[in-house]
Amino acid sequence: MAHWNRRSVVSVGLAAPSLSAAGYADNAHGVAIAAARLRRPLNTSAEDPILELVRFATLAANSHNTQPWLFERTPTGIAILPDVARRCPAVDPDDHHVFATLGCAAENIAIAAPSLGRAAEVVFEAEAKRVNIVLTSGASSTHPLVDAIPRRQCTRSVYDGRLIPTEQLALLEAAGAVEGVDMRLFTERAMIDRIRDTVIDANRAQMQDQAFISELRAWIRFNERSALATRDGLFAACSGNATLPDWLAGLLFPIVFTIESETKKYREQMASTPGVAVFTAASEDPAHWMRTGRAYQRFALQAAALGIKHAFINQPAEVPASRAPLADLLGMPGKRVDLLVRFGYAPDLPFSLRRPTEAVLRA
C-alpha cells in the first residue's frame, strides 16, 4: 500500500471544505478501543471456550485483512471453512492465500487451547476443503507463544537496520519447522538485495493489472470511520499512512499510488531489512498450503515474542511469471515458493481490526 505524498495531501486538503475534527477524533478513539478489546489476553476461565478460541483464531494473519474464514462448532471441536465471498480472485486465483490463512487461524487455536484445558489436533479434510480441529480434555498448560498472539502484526514500515542475533535466528528457524514445509532464512545483504529486485519487478507487473488495482483499492480503509464500519481491510494507519476522508483519498489514490512511489518504498524498506524468511511447501495443494500457514504463524508469533517485526513481500510468489525465476534465485528450482516475509526491528504501528467473533462463528 502506498505512502501518501505529503505535498499532495496538503495541497488538496487546503482546497477542501473544513472537516469535523471532533468526529474524526471520536472515530480514532473508537478504533483504539476496539483494537484493545479485540486483542485482550486469553480468558482462561471463559464461560464459552469455543467462542474464546475463535476470537484468538481471528487474530491470525490473512491476505488484505479480508478474513476469509468461517468457524463452525462441531461435536468434537471447531471446523474452519473458507468464506468464498471474501476471496481475492485477482491476487489469489487458486485460493492459495485462503488456505494458508486457515492454517494461520488453526495454529492460533492449537497454541491457545492448552491454556483452556484442551488438547488440539489439526486435520485438513481434503474432500470438504476445510480444517477440522479436534479438542479433547487435558491438563491445563501454557504454550510459550500464547501471549504473542494478540501482539502479532504485519509491520509495513522501514525497519531500523539492526541485525538479528544468531540465537534469535535459531529460535525463528525452530518455530517455523513444520512437517511438509521448508522454511529458510536469508540474512546475506547480497541475497536480500536480489530478493528486493524480484519484489520490485513483480510489484510492477501487479500494478499494471487493473483487476489487481481495483481489488486492492476495494479493501483499503482510508480512515477510522471506514475501519470501524467494516472491521476488515487494510486500515491506512496500520501501514503508517495518514488517514483521510474517503472522498479525498479517492482523489489522491491514483496520484500517489504509482509504480515509481511503490518502487521507492520497497527499496527503502528492503534496505532496512536484515532478514527474509521463505516458506515452500512440499506439494502444491490446499492441505500443504494450510501447513504453510501454520509454519508462518509459528514463525510470526516467535518473532513477536522476541520483539521482531515482519511483513509480507509476496509479490514474486503471486505473479506466475515471477515464480520460476524466484525459485531458481533461492536455490529451489522447480518449487513454488509460497510465502516471503521480511523481518527486523521497528516500533509498533496501530493494530488492525477484526469482525466480531459472533459474526464468523456458526452455531
Image (cartoon, rainbow, N blue to C red):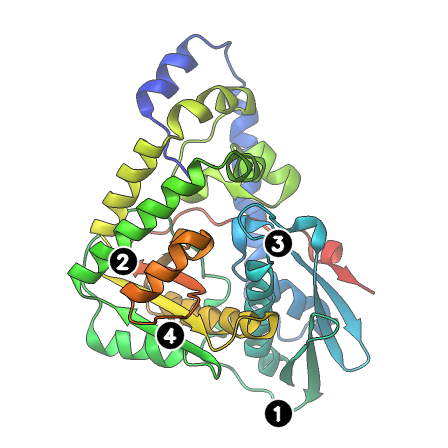
Q: Residues within 10 Å of mark 2 (few under 14, many from 20)?
A: many
Provide the residue designation for mark 3. 67
- Mark 2 or mark 3, earlier in chain: 3
Name the secondary structure under disc 4.
strand
Q: CA distance from mark 2 to mark 4?
A: 20 Å
Q: Amino acid at mark 1?
A: Ala
Q: CA distance from mark 2 to mark 3?
A: 26 Å
Numbered mark located on residue 183 in the image: 4
Left or right placement of residue 338 versus residue 10 in this view:
right
Numbered mark located on residue 345 in the image: 2
- Mark 1 or mark 3, earlier in chain: 3
Q: Are marks 2 and 4 in contact (CB under 8 Å)?
A: no
Q: Between 270 and 320, which is closer to the camera in this rendering?
A: 320
Q: Amino acid at mark 3?
A: Gln
Q: How many marks?
A: 4
The spot of residue 170 in percent (x, y) is 28, 79
Which mark lies nearer to you, 1 or 4? 4
Name the secondary structure under disc 1.
loop
Provide the residue designation for mark 1. 139
Name the secondary structure under disc 2.
loop
Q: Amino acid at mark 2?
A: Tyr
